[in-house]
Image: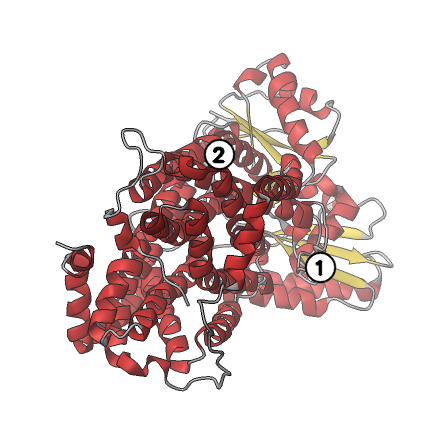
Amino acid sequence: MTIENSRTDGALAGLARFCYRRRRLVLLTWIVGVIAVAFVGFGYGAASDNDYSGGDSDSAKAQVLIKKHFPEQQGDTLTLAIKAAKGIDDPAARQKIEKVIADLDASPITGPVTSPYQDADLVTEDRRIARTTIPLTDKDVAKTEVKRLVDTVKDASGDGVTLGLGGDKAEKAETPPQGSTESVGVLAAAVILFIAFGSLVAMGLPIVTGLMAVLGGIALMKLVGHVVPSPDFTVLVAALIGLGVGIDYALFILTRYKDSLQDGDEPERATVKAITTAGHAVLFAGTTVVIALLGLIAMGQKMMTGVAIGASVAVLVTMIAAVTLVPAFLGFAGHKINSLRLPRRTSRQRGAERRTPAERWAGVVQRRPLVAAILAGAGLLVLATPALSMRLSLPDASVQPHDRSSYTSYQILSDGFGPGFGAPLIFAAEVADLRPVVEAVGKTEGIAYVTPPRVSQDGQAATFMAFPTTGYQEEATADLVHELRDDVLPKAPGGEAVYVGGPNAGAIDFAEDTGSRLPLMIAVVIVLSLVLLIALVRSVTIALQAAVMNLLSIGAAYGVLVAVVQWGWFGSALGFPTDMPITTWVPMMMFPLLFGLSMDYEVFLISRIREEYERTGDTRRAVALGLARTAKVITAAAAIMIAIFTTALLGPDVSVKQIGLGMAVAVLVDATIIRMLLVPAVMELCGKANWWMPGRRAPKVASPVRAVEETRV
């Protein structure tokens, strides 16, 4: 059997023919299926679960004790912060403040509200700043109900009185939805596709495929959430990655289809070729992304396991859409794939085949491969250097936009009661007398003040709170928690049985647990991806090159992220309200996603280089031709990814902004420095060693790897 026949007689070929010939049935099935899954998923899908606690950390043990012995402390609360220029006792200020408190107290979603005029502990000594706690009667209260309270407080500010409503529920209620930011990315992708193909029909096919796949994938992900709950940001991440890979996978297949038509094939045969070549590569690349995502399970954290499963479901749906929905669309398009074209001037080649700019560039790099490799490697290491100072934390009110009521509340409370008021430490133990521990903690440097201990109603546990002198995001607060656990508590009578918990300590434990497990997750992802890549290209050398280069591009993305978000370089211009640590889940979410996506580009480039090498036996020529024939499609695919990821910067969520920025930078680096500079330089230096595989000297001409033939625009 010839190689050509092997491409058109396998299972993928049969699937392509079926979808092409039964295109109406396939399209109808997709439309009905997506509508049905969307109706069930968005209507009856599982609620998100943002709980990052758990495990054997001190904060987790403290939470278990409090939940068991202090059930009355389990409800959500809001905090009203008050600042009056003339003092809260000024008649005009008091009238305004009491009116707001009465409105909050009368709300159907709040419990009794204590007025600061009734409790001196709620007012600063100069009586210019006050606070009070508003209990919520239902933990599942709707965001719209809380938003009404936030608006009530914001509308009452003015005339020398500043009011702010803080708390987790208030912060989420006033955070606007992501809105139409993804639509901006889709529009940008459409423009890129139109420029690449010059045809409205060819532009629309990848867009429609990507949108249908993302809608179905997210809805299915919500149903899977009943089995494996995932946090709320999973939907945004799945939308970003689903749109990116969904459009890109359709782009690669469509490009191969157009090439086959140009070579004289009929539409059905061109469709079969596209699916058995580019479609095969898509399945491999998508599998790599899924395996990389499942590497998050190695983190051993319930929340990240939910992210891994949820995002993997979305990617799986895009893979299925690429090899079923796309051939159906191609059946409808046929030779009209180039309809509604953009008027262009065409240039004709004269004489011998003209070398493309990418091929000429490859020649430049290959003439000085060592210099190119050193410059590229050094540049990537410089970009990655800031990552060495990366700090992890979870965002709180202090890093929100300054026009938010939650930030106003944070600022007022910090001015009046200290920056640590929003970062309390909650101590809990199954002992009745915590007075010696309270005294020892109160004398610790870095503690502003402590509250008297409270004994549970069953008499089996006690708890108290301590407020640091530093804020939630400050490194000194984390150092203080370690000092209390390692030095202060062990030396206090009964302190060895006391656990330090609360949201602040929980965020610190989560960040440290993530940092300790991250190397394991990285190792798992690299090993699994290497096995897959070796199976495809049958070269240990190229697989190792790919792993190292992917690590360099991801390291550069981490470095740029730290420089922008944590150091504040151009942070305000990119929509970050203030300098802040990197959100804890962002680096571990970025790594598997970016490693998988980088392997995508590696597959499309290396498979084409491998084909040329088998044909010519000349590594230098194979690299130049492979780069030339994939440069445009990889550039277009990367541009689409960058456009979609960058739109995350337009949204309100600072964590999603971070992951969007980091992934956009990584894809940019990967498609430019890595693919256009480092790959040709390193492959030129390695020569025939590129194709080393134990037990085999050189690839055979009739290798099945040619079935993963790459596309070109």
Q: Is residue 340 left or right of residue 266?
A: right
User: Which SS class for mark 1?
Assistant: loop
Tag 1 or tag 2, which sits nearer the N-term?
1
Query: Which amino acid type corresponds to the residue marked 2 in the rendered image?
Result: Leu
Residue at far front of view: 351
Q: Is residue 567 left or right of residue 31?
A: right
The residue tagged 1 is 402
Q: Which of 121 and 512 is in front in this view?
A: 512
User: Which SS class for mark 2?
Assistant: helix
Q: Which mark is residue 466?
A: none
Q: Depth-wise, is mark 2 or mark 1 nearer the camera?
A: 2
Instruction: Pinpoint residue 445: horizontal percent, then vertical percent.
Output: 75, 25
Tell me what residue is drawn at x 42 percent, y 68 percent. 713
In this rendering, the count of numbered labels is 2
The residue tagged 2 is 518
Tell me what residue is drawn at x 16 percent, y 55 percent. 2
Instruction: Please tell me in which quadrant of the rendered image residue 27 appears.
Output: bottom left
Tell me what residue is drawn at x 50 percent, y 46 percent. 679
Q: Is residue 42 left or right of residue 684?
A: left
Instruction: Pinpoint residue 709: horizontal percent, then vertical percent.
Output: 31, 56
Tell me what residue is drawn at x 57 percent, y 62 percent. 175
